[in-house]
Image: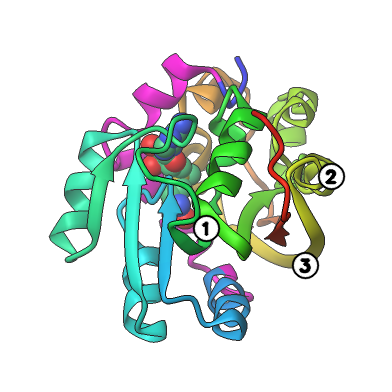
């Protein structure tokens, strides 16, 4: 199964449990990638910003508070939109592949850890470019295909199909089809899994991982896995690329 399989994506985000399990593990240390996104946005001072695939709205809330800009957020999951609204985020159920907005409506669009879930990736990117004004900023956050390879090697999962989706390794080339001036900021960190239970909690947090639960060995020492995240920053072209 791939991370852009629509049935998997719907099931994975119908409730927040899987996302919450992974978030509690990432919270361990290192650079907060959301700080990097906020710094990049602060440079361009957007007045109106769209976040696509907002999850429970944590980043949208921070952007609205810290940059004092008007934020609209969307997610394909009704539950995620409900959680975002509970934080006061102006959130709506919608699909990034068919944005319910007119051309040139936003100064910035943010897609954080969501493009690898989108099957019609070029369509989604052309939609994001369409709703951005000329010279607007697009920020995409994604993981490398090699993200947490130490953990997936341990449980015997082949992650090569990740490269068929939007990842750190191919993101620049993909974004260049729709945007100008693509820059890439790698953010590396380490997460320590102290015991096999911690590995089980992480691996069991998605149906992509659950099939590997039986292959988890008892750890004799903590497992250090490397988080490999990339923040892409791009600007819109003056001429539009059809989706
Ligand atoms: C890994 S979560 C990331 C959430 C949030 N951006 C964050 O940084 O925590 C991916 C989110 O993208 C949403 N998503 C996936 N495909 C989508 C699509 N085609 N349109 C809109 N949202 C989508 C999922 O429902 C999920 O909430």
Q: How is the image coloured?
A: rainbow
Q: Quadrant of ligand 1?
A: top left
Is 114 in front, or is 161? 114
Our reading of the magenta stretch's main secondary structure is helix
Q: Is residue 18 left or right of residue 220?
A: left
Image coords of residue 111 (percent x, y): 53, 51
Q: Is residue 119 left or right of residue 239?
A: left
Q: Which residue is drawn at the image coordinates 31% and 70% (left, top)?
A: 61
Image coords of residue 48 (percent x, y): 40, 69
Q: Residues within 10 Å of mark 1 (few under 14, many from 20)?
A: many
Q: Which residue is drawn at the image coordinates 48% and 66% (left, top)?
A: 27
Q: Which residues are magenta?
A: 5-33
Q: Quadrant of the N terminus?
A: top right
Residue marked by disc 2? 169
Image coords of residue 181 (percent x, y): 82, 62
Q: Is residue 226 visible?
A: no
Q: Is residue 183 magenta?
A: no
Q: Is residue 171 left or right of residue 141?
A: right
Kindly state the secondary structure of the residue where label 2 is placed.
loop
Residue marked by disc 1? 110
Task: Report the Cα–Cα distance between label 1 and label 3.
Answer: 15 Å
Residue marked by disc 3? 185
Q: Nearer the viewer, mark 1 or mark 2?
A: 1
Q: Is residue 55 visible?
A: yes
């Amino acid at each position: 199964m791939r991370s852009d399989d629509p049935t998997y994506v719907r099931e994975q985000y119908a409730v927040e449990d899987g996302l919450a399990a992974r978030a509690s593990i990432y919270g361990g240390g290192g650079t907060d990638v959301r700080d990097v996104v906020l710094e990049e946005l602060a440079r361009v001072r957007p007045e109106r910003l769209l976040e696509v695939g907002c999850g429970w709205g944590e980043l949208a809330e921070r952007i609205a508070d810290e940059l004092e800009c008007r934020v609209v957020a969307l997610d394909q999951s009704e539950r995620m939109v409900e959680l975002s609204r509970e934080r006061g985020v102006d959130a709506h159920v919608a699909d990034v592949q068919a944005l319910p907005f007119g051309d040139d409506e936003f100064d910035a669009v943010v897609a954080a850890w969501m493009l690898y879930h989108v099957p019609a990736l070029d369509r989604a990117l052309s939609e994001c470019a369409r709703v951005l004004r000329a010279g607007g900023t697009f920020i995409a956050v994604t993981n490398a295909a090699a993200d947490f390879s130490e953990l997936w090697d341990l449980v015997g999962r082949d992650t090569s199909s990740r490269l068929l989706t939007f990842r750190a390794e191919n993101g620049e080339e993909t974004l260049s089809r729709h945007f100008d001036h693509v820059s890439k900021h790698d953010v590396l960190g380490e997460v320590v899994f102290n015991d096999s239970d911690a590995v089980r909690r992480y691996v069991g947090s998605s149906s992509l991982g659950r099939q590997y639960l039986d292959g988890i060995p008892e750890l004799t020492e903590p497992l250090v896995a490397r988080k490999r995240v990339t923040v892409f920053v791009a600007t819109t072209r003056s001429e539009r690329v059809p989706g």
